[in-house]
Structure formats: C-alpha cells, structure tokens
Image (tube, coloured by chain):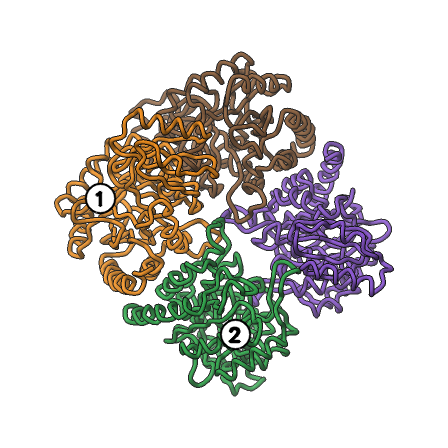
Chain colours: A green, B orange, C brown, D purple
Amino acid sequence: MIIKLQNSISEKDKQNIINTLLAKKYKTSEVKTQSGNYIVAIGNYNTDIRTFGKLKGVLDIFRVPDTYKFVSSKWKINPTEIKINKNISIGGRNFTIIAGPCSIENENQVTTIAKHLVNNNIKFMRGGVFKPRSSPYTFRGLGLKGLKMFHQIAKEYNLKIITEVMEISQIPQMYEYVDIFQIGTRNSQNFNLLAELGKINKPVMIKRALSGTIDELLQSAEYIFSSGNEKIILCERGIRTFENAYRNTLDLNAVTILKEKSHLPVIVDPSHGVGIRNHIIPMSLASVMAGADGIMVEIHPIPEEAKSDGQQTLNLQEAEDLYNKLNETVKLRNKILLHL
Amino acid sequence: MIIKLQNSISEKDKQNIINTLLAKKYKTSEVKTQSGNYIVAIGNYNTDIRTFGKLKGVLDIFRVPDTYKFVSSKWKINPTEIKINKNISIGGRNFTIIAGPCSIENENQVTTIAKHLVNNNIKFMRGGVFKPRSSPYTFRGLGLKGLKMFHQIAKEYNLKIITEVMEISQIPQMYEYVDIFQIGTRNSQNFNLLAELGKINKPVMIKRALSGTIDELLQSAEYIFSSGNEKIILCERGIRTFENAYRNTLDLNAVTILKEKSHLPVIVDPSHGVGIRNHIIPMSLASVMAGADGIMVEIHPIPEEAKSDGQQTLNLQEAEDLYNKLNETVKLRNKILLHL
Amino acid sequence: MIIKLQNSISEKDKQNIINTLLAKKYKTSEVKTQSGNYIVAIGNYNTDIRTFGKLKGVLDIFRVPDTYKFVSSKWKINPTEIKINKNISIGGRNFTIIAGPCSIENENQVTTIAKHLVNNNIKFMRGGVFKPRSSPYTFRGLGLKGLKMFHQIAKEYNLKIITEVMEISQIPQMYEYVDIFQIGTRNSQNFNLLAELGKINKPVMIKRALSGTIDELLQSAEYIFSSGNEKIILCERGIRTFENAYRNTLDLNAVTILKEKSHLPVIVDPSHGVGIRNHIIPMSLASVMAGADGIMVEIHPIPEEAKSDGQQTLNLQEAEDLYNKLNETVKLRNKILLHL
Amino acid sequence: MIIKLQNSISEKDKQNIINTLLAKKYKTSEVKTQSGNYIVAIGNYNTDIRTFGKLKGVLDIFRVPDTYKFVSSKWKINPTEIKINKNISIGGRNFTIIAGPCSIENENQVTTIAKHLVNNNIKFMRGGVFKPRSSPYTFRGLGLKGLKMFHQIAKEYNLKIITEVMEISQIPQMYEYVDIFQIGTRNSQNFNLLAELGKINKPVMIKRALSGTIDELLQSAEYIFSSGNEKIILCERGIRTFENAYRNTLDLNAVTILKEKSHLPVIVDPSHGVGIRNHIIPMSLASVMAGADGIMVEIHPIPEEAKSDGQQTLNLQEAEDLYNKLNETVKLRNKILLHL
C-alpha cells in the first residue's frame, strides 16, 4: 500500500499515521522524492484501507499488490514523461533516439559524432568513459578526464549526455558532466549503487541484468524510486540464453510486458541485444512496434577501428538510414497503436 | 559442396562423378527433389572444385561451408517462394497470415472461424487435430475424424489447411486433407519424421525446438530437403529461458538471422511465443519489422471456452484489429526495407 | 485419483465405477499394466474419496495431486525395482552400471567391449544402432543389421542390451534383440512413441529433454505407464544452459529431486552430461552421492577412433578405474544414506 | 605471458623489461601481490619468449593462453592453499566446512550456532550483516553493528568469520571484524569492488554470477589477483536456468572444471544451489566427489523463524548429520581420487 501524504504534513501527523500502521502490524518505509512524500506499508492485505484514508495528512491511498510499488502501473496508470529540460523529455508521447560510440576515445571522434547527431536532429549522445570489461587487461575507458572532454563538446553542440556510472564514489565526480546516469547490466542488482542514485536529482537509466527477470528489473527500479528519485528509465538490452548465433537474446517480449506492468519509459539497446551490425536496423524497428519509448544505439565514424564493440556498431551512414526508418516506423505506430 | 546434375544425366555419368568424389575422399549423398537432382559431397575443402565442374552431367557446383547445405543462403541467394496453388504462395514477396483455433473442436467453431477468415481475405487456416500435450490425461484432439470435418469446411470456404503431424503413420492418413504439414516444437529433431516428410510433395512448416538453436533448426530443415522435399517453411515460436513473466521468449533475433542464413520463408507464431493475449498484437507487428514472411496466430470465437490455449488466443474482433495493423505495418516495411 | 481395481473385476462393476465418477464430473482413463488394473480420475478435489472405496471391485484408492499420477511417490512410496531376469534388477537397492560404445561399429569392437564388461562383472551394455544426429550427412548407425550382430555377441557374453529406438516402426523390428529400450533426449516428448512403448512388456529408459523440466520428464514417463508399461527408468543426461565450458549441464539436483518425487529408478549419463573425458569420473561419483540408481557411460577400446562422441568416451582402462571408484562410493553411500 | 620479477629488481631494470616488451608491441600491466612482483604482457604469441628470459631482473616466464592469467592452472599447477592462521587453511589438502545463518539476527542466535560449530570442530562461521535483497522493503541485515557483535562472539569461540561485502566504502569499516570477505553473486562482475578487494591482505571468496560463465568467474578472480591479492576462493552457488523445481541449478560440472582450469580453491554453496532443505545433504556429498575444497551451508537453531532463507536452512541436528557424512565422504574421496 502506498500512502501519499500532504507535502505540508506535520511531523506529528506523520508519526500518527505510522503508529496506526504499526499497530495493525504493517511494516512501513518513508519515501520522499522530488515530487512527493509517501509512506509504503507492507502487511495484512485484509485491512480496510479506508481507515487510513481518514487520517490527518493523508492525500491518497493505493493498494499495489506487486512486490514493487512506485514503479507499478497499478499505482500510476499514465506513462511517465521525464523532463530533461523544458524542450526535451523521455517517455510519454516521445520517441527518443540515443546514439554514440561504445567508448569515448578522443576529441575528434566525439566531435564527428556530435555533428552527425545535430545534423540528424538527435538530442542524446551516449559514450562510455568508465567501461566494465570482463578482463582486467582490456581498455577500461578514459575515465573522468574523458568525461570532461565529452561534456565540453556535447555542451557546444547542445547534446545531452548519457554515460555509465560503475561505483558510488564516481557519482559526485561525474555529477555536473552527466545528464542521464546509466546503470550497466552487471550492476543491475548493485543495490547500494541503486540506492545512492536514488538520492540525486538526475535521471537514471537502468539496464536489465544478463539473466535478470522483468520482476527483478522493476524491483531494482523500486530501489531508486524509494530512495527518492522518480526519474527512472528502464532499458532492455538482451538476455543470456543457450543461443550463440548472436550476442544476446534481445527480448522484445519484455518491452511490451514492461509497458504494461510499469509506467516508466522503456529504451531498447539493440547493439548489445542482437549484437551484430546487419541486424541492428530490423531489431530497432521491431522494438518500436513492441512498444519501446526509444532506442540507444552504438555508432562510430569507423566501427572497424572502435576501441570496443566494433562488430555491433553502425557507421554514420548506416545510422542515418536507421534514424529515417525509425521515424517512419514511429509515425506508423503512433497512428495504429495510439489507442492501446 | 553441392553439385547440381543435369536432370537427364545417365546413371553411368552420375556414377563417374560419385567415384571421382570418393577417390578424393569425399563422402557423398544423392539428393533428388521435386525440382532438382544433386550430389552433396562433404570432405576436403582444399580441392579445386573446378575439377568437378568439367565432369559430364554436372550443371553447376556450389561451395557451402555451413553444416546445412541446401537450406543455406550461400547456395541459393534469392528468397524461396513456395507455391500453394497458382494464386497463393508463401515467402518471396508475400506476407502470409495463418489464423485459426489451437484445436479443432466442432463444425460450428470451424465454420465461424472460416467465415471470419474469408471476410478478412485470409487464405490459410490452422487447427490442431493431433495435439501434443505434456500430460496423457488432457484433451489430445479430435484426430483424423476431426481433420476430415475441418477439410470439408475449409474446402467449402476455399481455405488452405495447416495442421500438425505427430507421427509417420499419420502422414498417409492425413495426406489428402492437409495443405501444409506442421512439425511441432517437440518433434523439431524427430529425424525419422523429418526424413519421411522429405518424401512427400506438400509443404512442411517446421517449428524451432524449445531450446533449439538456429543452426539445429536449419539442420532439421536440411533433413527434409535432402530427403527430397524443397517446400520448407521455418517457424519461430519462442524459446525456453529463465523468464516466467510470459510463456516463451519469442526470439525475433532468430527471425532476422534466419532470413540472412537461409532462403526459406520464416513464419512467426506469437501465440505460443509471448503467450499472453494482450501482447500478441505488438509482438506480431514487431515480427514484421524483424523480417518475418508471415504470422501464425491462434483465434477463437470465444477464447475463454477454447479447449486449449485460451489465454493466448484472440477473439475474432481482436483478430481483425491485428490483421489491419499487420497490413499497414507490412506496407511500411515493404517501403522502407525492400532494398535490404 | 488412482483407483486400483480387483484383477477379477467384472466389466459391469467397472462400468458402474466409471459411471459414478462421471456423474461426479470426473474425467476417467482406464489403465491396464503388467501388474495392475486401474482407473485414473481427474476432477473435483473436494469429493470425499471414501465414497468410491465402497464400490464393488475397488481394491484401493489414492489421491495424487501431482499432474503425473502413477509415477509419483505419492502413489507408490517404495522405490521401484525393475526385474530384468531373476538375478538382475535395476532400482530398489541395486546400483547399475551400463557401459558401452556410443555407436555399435563392428564385431571386433563389440566383442572387445563385451569381454571387458564381463571381466568387470557388468551386466548391461549400451550401444547405438539408430543414431539421432543433428546433420543428415553424418553417420547414423548400423541399423537393424548392427543390432542383430550386437545381440548375438551380447547373448554369448550374457550381457543385457540397452539401445535407442527412434521410431514406432522400429519397435517390433528391434523387439527380440533388445532388453531395455532407450528413448533419446530429442524424443523425450514424442508422445506417440512413448504411448507405443507403453504397450510392450520390456523396460524403457527415458532421457530428459534438452530443456525438459523435471515435471515434464515425469509426465512423459506417465505416458508410458498409463499406456500399460510399468517398467520405466528415468535418465538425467544434462540440460542445455548458457554455459559452454562443457557439453551439457549435468543436473544432479534433478537426481535427488526425482528420487523424492517419483518411485522410479534414476540413471545418470555423465558422458552426455559434462561431455568431457577428464570429468566423467568425478561427475559419476557425484551422481552416486546425489542418489542415482546407476550410471550409463560411454566406453571404447580406442576413443580417438570412435565413430561418434570420442571426446566424451573413456578407454577401457579409464573405465575400470571408474567401476572401482563407483563401487567404493556406492558402498559408502549405502552405509551413510541408507536411512534417508 | 606472465613475467615473474626478482623481488629486489631495480626500477631501471623493470623499465628496461617493460620497454623491451612495448617495443615488441606487447601491452603490459605491472602486478604486485603479497608474494610476488610480476609483469603481465599481452600481445604477439609468435615471439620467442626466451628473449625476455635473459633480461636482468627476470626470474621466470610463463606463457598462459587463457584470458585469465594468474588464476590459471597453466601458470600455477599445484592447488593453492590459503593460510588463515598457522593452523587453519583453505584449499590444498584441506576440506573446509563453513556454516552459519543466512543473516546475523541477535546475540542468542550467534552464540547458539557458535557453540554448535565448536562442538563439531568447525572453524568457519558465515553470517550476513549486509544483505542484498531484490526488494527494498525486506530485511537488509543488521549492518556494521551486527558485524561487531558477530565478531566479538566469534572471537570468544575462536571461529573465523566470512561475510558479504556489498560496497567499497564498507571494506575499511568491516576490515578488522572479518576474516574472509565474500563477494555475492550479484556483485560477481562489480569490477570496482573486485579491484578494491585486490588491494587488501585478507582472503576473498567470490561467488559465480547468476548466469556467469566459468570463464567470467575466473576473469573476475583475475581482477582481484592483478590488483594485488592472491588470496582468492571461488564459490559455485547455482546458476539460473529454465528449471523451477528447485531454487538454482547447482552446477557441479563447474566444480570439476574449475579445479582443472584454476589452482584456486573451490567452495560449494548447496543452500543457495538446490535451495531446498531435504536436498542439501545429497548435493553436499555430491560436491565432495565433484572435487570441492569445501562446503558453505546455511544453518539456524530454528530455520522456520530465520529472517531469511529458512526453506533452505538446516537445523542444528541436520547440520551435524551433514558434517558426519561429509567427513566420511571426504575420507573416501581422499583415498580414491588423491592421485588425480
């Protein structure tokens, strides 16, 4: 059960609500986000929740039977739109394209891609500076220095930056240079990192774990929300199965199901999903029809020379082809699926 | 290596070719299909294959390094179009909708659905009469009697029938009542059944196994082809993974990859794939963009009363909605992906 | 619910029982096996089953809530012992070693292995003559002729034969030459084959499917039992997962759980399980401690020259080492786990 | 290639070695651990490595073709024995039992279990104080305060503590109270945490990820080693598959393969593996035969009242039964497998 409190509620009234809940054997958690003030109460589902509705300071009460509460569409029916600035949002009725290299490599690379994005009216640039790599002996990114360079160029081109954060101590260091923090697939259940990202006021995009269930992804998102940050984006990036003909099994079933179970926007990453250049475009368009709110794709001026993930990276011409096809497909989707 | 022989080749010339191959340590298999006469030779990849090209009776030679040969797009680059009659084909530039109940139940059910299909300009009706069921104590279909009834009504409405065959002895019994034989997911590597279906002259649609790889599916198709039947349709129907939020993980990655690796048509079955009614439409449209040559979907006048699979079955109104959206999506795909 | 009938029950009394059940909305199936005469009734679990106990001809009644009935340990608590002849059994308190080549190749191979088995006091020899192979262009076994040769030598050495049957029409051809019919992993849900093997009076060993659940394996076994054959052996042979460091994930969890859920004997096949020669011995001994009733292992005089599966096949010296270690481990297990 | 340096090597000689390597297009990493001083060089495998052997300051050179280097048995053939104090070690010829509750709950619980362990001659006690939980609304452990209490009691009973660390900032806080740091399955690829644990001088036990491959586990271990800490223990705790009859698929194949590929000790956690109380004992004994160096098991005075994981926790009597059976099984293994 989620109890929405008046923002002006007095400490005394809040304590009274909590005590009433405790007396009925509920476990309570206080949650304060950018836009709301709540109590989550877990416990006996047979209580008549109207009892609590009459308590002073209570604005509204919702019963949410899922293990996740705030990220559930049973609590909030309308799709969430995350404002990046007054002109740009993710989710809601928007379709967002995020493109950029796997790794930030040098100024020339970033500038070339930034120009390409601006020419194609794309607002978000991805680029890793802290790279999670299976082996300790491979390139692990340019780090903070690379991020600052990335930030400066992005700012010049009026692009918003999304990049991965791997560790709590990186959050304050990265904060002013990042527009959206990304949680990588291997940190999808790094609960301390999630909770810490719940304390900031910037959007967080969380990727599904390698073999993470849909429920687990939503519970991880709940960690962020219940720590205070409502600005959450979900990302489907392929799961690990027995099949080896491609890199990961991009799971578009998850997209349509996440859109039903949650109000949060869902971005698809076909680059890590299918993971083979030839198949990025069809899988991106398929993602649109499955209900995605956007696509995050790896591009590079010369994929063959990319420091990482070259085999799944589009060159800039292929990327333009993708954007055009995405636009047409989104237009059709909006026409035929709008009433869904 | 596939050696295409002249249809008029003499037995003596053929033996000469085979002996030449055996002398070079190749293993040979003769293959005679509806439209061709071949020798498959497996062996030393360092031989200069032009040597064989000069032998009498040889029409053409292809090197195919895949484990499957005839179903590979390295042998036949253009997509295969399977003629059902002079007006109807599957594959090539067609998009095929196959719809019908999970199980054939009674005349009234079949007639209602048949009318619905005709009204929607659909040419293929599915319907199981031999039902593979995990438990021996559940409904296993109406059998041959049901098939005859199904056939009679379908004929009346000018619909083509696709239905599952579970066992070799059923093939001759079913033969005159069936237009396309379906091999179910649990028989996807029933090699004897595959080989036997290679001896008939009707199309065969083979489903991917529950945890079958793309390579295994193509090798199973190769069993049919190498036994003499070129009319093969592949079907992606969802794989088994760790995720339980839906029935099976419909794997659209497999669709785009199968279209690259093979010239055979690929049909998607979203009903068994995602397996939840609400999600059939988005996954069907996504399948189109992933490159599917068609969709096979379960429909029923009253899904709640269906003898099997009700939870994944569309009612007739939902089905019409699906057809309309499919048509628009296919139109867009043909426009934007045609040159792929 | 399983209703055990008197063997001498009259047709009229049986009909009366069935009619009583039907009147209470049960679905009924008659089952007649080598040793019993039963009615399986599926339906309302709220009925007082004692009502039926009083009907004429009823011997006993068991409530079995599992989807499988006869193979459940809720019906039959004591482990089943399958008599092969008056001296040899599988299951119960026995530990059975089955060894032999992947494929029967020639007389010399069979004789060498037969002698080795006799020297090591092993009673069961495996050997494939109908080989399921992913590719149609690989060796598919010597067929019936090979089986006859195998049978003759096995008889001479007083060995019992277990070999795979792939197709219904092979059953009568193979019948007199086979002691235990094996159902391969790819036919684990070939329900027609299962039902047909339910009509014979020889033991059947059924392998778990590549991604078959424990429940599905037991339901497949139920097909055999409910068709009339009680002599069923289960086989764990490794499942398909994401891991590629070995051939299949031999699932010893399944062994201990099958022993709890079912009264049927469980054999482990480490050769197809882990699938790497070095690891066969530890996994075999681990199987013993997990509760296996026996081991089926691939051996060959010269594994490097085996026509199939050489990399997972032990040579005869390694095999002897395995038998000795198995014997010691079984002895210990009997000592420490007997009361479980 | 691993180049072992003389401990007394001068900075100048080291630079000379590095420069020689760089000139040959190698990428180099310096590694300094508790007991050694190394350069890892990745590059051209065609070089004659004897060239480098002659350089001043080089003690030895090893070619290790695996992606992991120091944890590979190609570098160090003999099993590693990790000394905890002068009497207690893990690995080598030892078999280690670690037991304790899932979560540390209160003094009484800890004391009861500690006494039980001492009575059974067990040296290691597990117990979580920082608990990774899928949902933010469940019990997350007693934290540092709980650890201090745990430490005090453990010290009194002369028990060594193993407990999970979830976050870098916890390392210094926990350091003096912990004997072995555990990395949980969800942090198995938290590379920053791994690297940080590479800088301490206490043993680290790393669990395999939910769907982590054997190779990935070894590469994660390589992160710790290459950051300076040689004291690493691997832990198999079950992988995520399609099967739902148990909690996770405890993968004993991984145990025997890890013992071949690496010199590090391997502990099995059957509690999280099979995850059902009845099956803990057989799976533990099976682990011994598969080659495990030890077992970590969850126990509780009253499992039904445990704050977490009760269904997979043994009570103290069951635990004693397990220890006795483990001892007998280890004795047998040492007898029959020692020469392996």
- The residue under the point 33% across, 46% down is B76
The crowding category of the residue bearing disc 2, from other C-alpha atoms within 10 Å (few below 14, some 14 to 19, many at least 20), is many
Percent x, y for residue D195?
Answer: 70, 63
- Viewer-closest of B251 and A195: B251
Chain at tag 1:
B
The reply to whether label 2 and label 1 mark residues of one chain is no
Percent x, y for residue C110?
Answer: 54, 19
On screen, residue D248 versus residue C28, left or right, reads right
* Residue C26 visible here: no
- The residue under the point 69% across, 52% down is D69
Up/down of B313 relative to B35, above or below? below
Residue annotated with mark 2 = A162
Q: How many marks?
A: 2
Name the quadrant containing residue C113.
Answer: top right
Residue annotated with mark 1 = B161
On screen, residue D277 versus residue A216, left or right, reads right
Chain at tag 2:
A
Callout 2: helix, strand or loop? strand
Q: How far apart are marks 2 and 1 (CA)?
A: 52 Å
Amino acid type shown at disc 1: Ile
Amino acid type shown at disc 2: Ile
Q: Which tag is nearer the camera, tag 2 or tag 1?
A: 2
Percent x, y for residue B33?
Answer: 28, 35
- Viewer-closest of C60 and D313: D313
The crowding category of the residue bearing disc 1, from other C-alpha atoms within 10 Å (few below 14, some 14 to 19, many at least 20), is many
Up/down of B200 relative to D219, above or below? above
Q: Which quarter shows the C terminus of chain D?
A: top right
- Viewer-closest of D146 and D79: D79
On screen, residue D177 versus residue C246, left or right, reads right
Up/down of D267 relative to A169, above or below? above
Name the quadrant containing residue A189.
Answer: bottom right
